[in-house]
Image (spheres, rainbow, N blue to C red):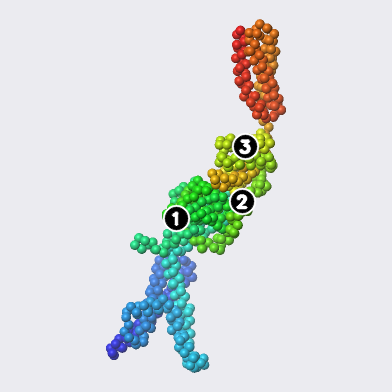
Amino acid sequence: MLEKISFKLDKGKFLSRVSKISLFVWLACIIGVFVIVGYVVGIRKELFDRAPDVFTFSLFGLIILGCLAFLVGIISFIAQLITKKPQKKQNIFIFLIKLFLILSIFPLYLLIYIIKPVEIITRIKHAGLKGLLRTFSTKLLLSKTIAFALVSVIILPIWVGGYTVVGAIIKEELGYGKEPIAISGTGSMYPTFPKGEGKDPKKLAEQIVGTPGMIRYPNGIVIAGKRFLNYEIGRGDIVVVENEKIREMTKSMYGDPSGWVKRVIGLPGDSIELRGGIVYLNVEPLKEPYIAKPRSTFGESFLSECKKVVVPENHIFVMGDNRKGSGDSREIGFIEIGAVNHVLPLKDQKGELAKYWRDTSKDFDETSKIKLDKEKYLQLLNEKRKEAGARELKYQPKLELSARKRGEIILKFNDFSFEATQSGYTMAKAMRDANYSNVVYGEAPTQGYYEAEELIENQFQFPETKKFLTDKSYQEIGIAEVEGEINGCPAQVIVQHFAGYVPPNYSKEVIDSWKNILSRLKEIQSGWAKLKEYKEFYEKNKQDVDRINEIISARIANISTIVARMEANQWLSTAEQKMIDQDKFLHEEQEAIATRLNSR
C-alpha cells in the first residue's frame, strides 16, 4: 500500500515538473517571437519574404516549439488534475476519455477550477456572503484574480483561435470554404448581378461586376472510392459550368474561352417546358423572383416552345436570369454535373444578391404579359436613326393595319419569310388591303414579348437588322403585336412595317432612248397606215397590215405614257412597268411582220 502511494506521489511530482518546464519554454518562445518580429519589422524595416532566411527559420521554429510546449504542458497539467486525488485504479480508456474531454474545454475547465462555483455557493448557503469573504485571504484572492485574468486573456483566446483555425482548415479541405468568383458584365445573370457598361460584348466580358463567394464542387471527402459530405446541387443554385461546347461558344463571342455562370432550373428526372414565356417545371408553372422580367423565357434551338424535355441522370438544366440575353441550356442542351466546378447555394443568395428580385404574386396573370410601348419604341428608334444620319419616322395607322394582317398570316402558316412562301400573302398585298401604297417598303417580324428598350437592344445587336432599321429611304412606320398559336403553342409576333417615297431620278440616257423609239414609231406610222389604200395588196395581206398598225399604235400610246412619267420623275405604276416588259415582245412581232410584208 505504501509503495502504491509513493508511486502516485512521484508521478504527481513528475507531471508537475513537466507542466512547469513546458510553461517556461512556452513563455520563452512567445518572448522570442516578439523579439524577432520586432527586430525584423521595427528595426530592419523589412518583411519576412525579404529578410535573411535565418530570421524566418528562427521565427517558425519558435512558433512550432511554443505550440508543442503548450500542448505538452496542458496535457501534463490535466493528467495531474485527474490523478491528484487518491482513487481506485482506473481503466486507461476512461483516463484517456477524461483527458480528451478536459482538453476539448480546457479554458472553461480552468476557469471552473479557479473559481470553484459549487464550493462558493455552498459557503454562501451556510455562512452567507460575509462569511464567504472572511474565508478568502488577500493573497488567495489576488492569486485567483491573476490566474483568472491569465486564462481569460491568454489561454481562452488561443483556444478559441485554435478551434477557429482547425474548423477553417477542415472546412477548406472539405471544399466548403468560400472562393471569390469573378462575374463578367455580359448581363446574362441580370438582375442578380448587374450589367456592364457599353454595348461591345468583348468589352462587357472584360468588366467584373461582382465577386460572390462560392464553394468548390464536388466537395466533401473520398473514402474507399466513395464521396461523403458532398454538397447536393439544388434548384435555384447558381453554378459555374464549363465544358468544350461552352468554351467554344465563349471564345467565338468574347475572344477568350471561359465557363458560364448560370442558375440551376432542372435536376435529374425533372420535366421542363416553355409556354407563353413561362417555365413549367414538372407540369407546374415556376415562380422565379430572380429573373429580369415575368413571362420572358422563350425557346431556342434545343428547347423550343411547348416542347417538353426530361433532364437525364447526372445532368442539370441551367438558364441565365436575364432570359432574353442569355445563352444557356435552351440553346446547347443539358449540362453534365461533372462540368460544375463551383456552386452558390440558393440559401446563400438572400440579402445583397436578392435585393433586385421581383414580387412574383401576379406573374401568371394576363396583366403581367409584357406590352410594347409603341410611342417609346418609335422615340428610341428615331434617336438611333438620328445618330445614323437618317430622317425621323412618322407613325402611320394604315401601316399598323397592314402589319396586323401580315402578323395573323405569319402565325397561321408559321412563315416568317418576306416572300410569304407558304401563304402567298405578301406585305404588298397587306398594304393594298389596308388602302396604303408607297414606293419603298420593308418588314421586320420578331417573335416574343418585348418592352421598347428590350426590342431596340435586341434588334441593334445584329448588323443587318441595324442597317435595315436605319435605312434613309423609309419615312413611315406601323407596328402591330399579334397573339395566336404556332402548331398549337401560344405565340406572339411583333410586326413592323416601314415605307417611304424616293424619287426615281431616271438618267437622261434612259429617257432619251425611249423618246427616240417614240419618235421613230411616229415617223413610220403613216407609211404603214397607207398600205390600206393599196386595195389589192391590202386584200392579200389584210391580217399582217392590220396587226402591224395595231402594234405601232399600242407602242406609241404605251411609250408616250412611260416618257411622260419619266420626264415628271415619277415612279412607273405596276401597269406601266408591264408595258416596258411587253414592249420587247411587241417590237419583235413588229419586226417579223415588217420583214414578211417587205418581201412580198
User: Is label 1 in a helix, a strand or a loop?
Assistant: loop
Specify the farthest residue to the front.
488
Circle 1 residue: 268
Q: Who's the residue at 45% across and 82% down the image?
A: 111
Amino acid type, label 3: Met
Q: Are marks 3 and 1 in contact (CB under 8 Å)?
A: no
Q: Nearer the viewer, residue 35 or 222?
A: 222
Circle 3 residue: 427
How packed mark 1 is, by other alpha carbons closer than 10 Å (few <14, some 14-19, many 20 or more), is: some
Q: Nearer the viewer, residue 396 or 425?
A: 425
Viewer can see residue 194: no
Can you give x and y, in whole percent of width and height, for residue 144 in the image?
A: 46, 86
Can you give x and y, in whole percent of width and height, for residue 311 in the image?
A: 45, 53
Cα separation between marks 3 and 1: 47 Å
Cα separation between marks 2 and 3: 26 Å
Mark 1 and mark 2 lie on one chain; the one further toward the N terminus is: 1
User: Is label 3 in a helix, a strand or a loop?
Assistant: helix
How packed mark 2 is, by other alpha carbons closer than 10 Å (few <14, some 14-19, many 20 or more), is: some
Amino acid type, label 2: Ile
Q: Who's the residue at 47% across and 63% down the image?
A: 178
Mark 3 and mark 1 lie on one chain; the one further toward the N terminus is: 1
User: Is label 2 in a helix, a strand or a loop?
Assistant: loop
Q: Are marks 1 and 2 in contact (CB under 8 Å)?
A: no
Mark 2 and mark 3 lie on one chain; the one further toward the N terminus is: 2
Q: Who's the residue at 48% across and 78% down the image?
A: 153
Tell me if residue 533 comes above or below residue 367 in the rendering: above
In the rendered structure, find residue 370 and report the number of the disc placed on it.
2
How packed mark 3 is, by other alpha carbons closer than 10 Å (few <14, some 14-19, many 20 or more), is: many
Amino acid type, label 1: Pro
